[in-house]
Image: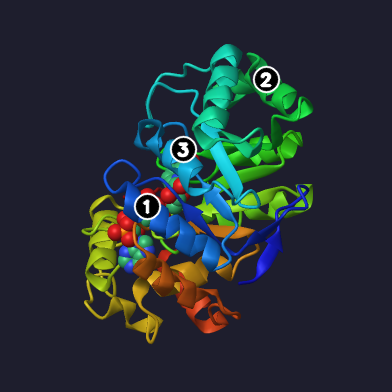
Amino acid sequence: MLYRRLGRTDLQVSELSYGAARGATQEPKQFIATVHACLDAGLNLIDTATGYDNGDSERVLGEALVGHDDALIETKYCPYENYSPAAKYTGSPEALISSAEESLRRLRRDRLDILLGHGLRTLDTLDQFMNDGCYDALAKLKQQGKVRFIGISELSEADGTHQVLQRAVQTGAFDAVMLTLNFVLQTAADTVLPLCTQHDVGTVVMMPLNQASKQSGLVSVEAALECVRHHVSQGNLPDESPYADPALFDLLLPYSVPEAALRYVLAHDVTTCCVGTRSPERLAQNLQAVDPPYLDQARLARLRELFGGIERQVL
Ligand SMILES: NC(=O)c1ccc[n+]([C@@H]2O[C@H](COP(=O)([O-])OP(=O)(O)OC[C@H]3O[C@@H](n4cnc5c(N)ncnc54)[C@H](OP(=O)(O)O)[C@@H]3O)[C@@H](O)[C@H]2O)c1
């Protein structure tokens, strides 16, 4: 496993990190086995959130990580009533502080490595978060040593061109951000990643497989073709060749679609590619993607030609 510097935090983070969004409630034993397989493979950053599995993700992680104090945990406070793009902003400094205290309790830690504002989705609500005491509360937790580093994540379904992160990164207020980058939403490569490099902000990439379900996403040829069909039907791609060609993804061979998708992310100037799975076997497959040079220039150029114009996320 190779490690990359997480911007100004100076933390050395494994190129592949673990997204703990699913599995803690339904299959806690399997979830713990997967977390342990991650640690054994050298992954040292785990992403969770208060809202994942209603707190079970943090709670079961707390159990899994007893005796693994070196594992870095990133968790989040969501200042909205839910995860939908139109959800009402409900952030408050009091709620943020009590959410962080709950996270510490569930995770059985006395400090959080990284705490993010979760899913900031409009410029207006970013401004609210910065000015209503929420940001000050984050900064205070850092000052008190309860949190080592602070940042925000975006909601790419609402902000496919990363307006929120572009503004946030330039304030200089954040140590790290979590952002979407994958080969069917490439916009971050030109917009927010250069700003992160310039401002020395660490970058944790989410949705490398476009938050796949079995039906649509970058997990198989069939699911990737379905994702392309969604883009065509929403006018994000033209209804013409080669987008309807069943052999569209042959260009990725000999890589599978998910392996190529992870390689695509790692070929960029990002700190770590965060992917979720509920099985150690899947994790073993994903570990195949971590050998440099990741993806060659010819495939990167072709993927850009095919999908680089997409500016909206379609799940
Ligand atoms: N706004 C935000 O802050 C935000 C939003 C979204 C995600 N996140 C974070 O980012 C992490 C990564 O996001 P994600 O899009 O990867 O979602 P995810 O919720 O972690 O799901 C990934 C999906 O892809 C499947 N998968 C993984 N590797 C595969 C492979 N090699 N072949 C086939 N299927 C594979 C997994 O299925 P199995 O479980 O069956 O293996 C899982 O269903 C999340 O876990 C979460 O921590 C943050």
Count residues near mark 3 (Cα–Cα under 10 Å), then give few for <14, some for 14-19, many for 20+. Answer: many
Mark identifier at residue 58: 3
Q: Amino acid at mark 2?
A: Ala
Asked whether mark 1 and ligand 1 are closer than 8 Å, the reply comes as no
Q: Ligand 1, what quadrant?
A: bottom left
Pick whichever of labels 1 and 3 is earlier in the sequence.
1
Q: Which residue is mark 2?
A: 137
Q: Please tell me which residue is depicted at 25% across the width and 69% down the height of the picture.
A: 240
First in sequence, mark 3 or 2: give its number.
3
Q: Position of residue 253 (x, y in %)?
A: 37, 85
Marker disc for residue 31: 1
The CA span between labels 3 and 2 is: 21 Å
The spot of residue 174 in percent (x, y) is 71, 37
Judged from the image, the secondary structure of the residue bearing numbered disc 2 is helix
Label 1: few (<14), some (14–19) or many (≥20) C-alpha neighbours in 10 Å = many
Marks 1 and 2, how far apart at CA? 32 Å
Per the image, label 3 sits on a secondary structure element best described as: helix
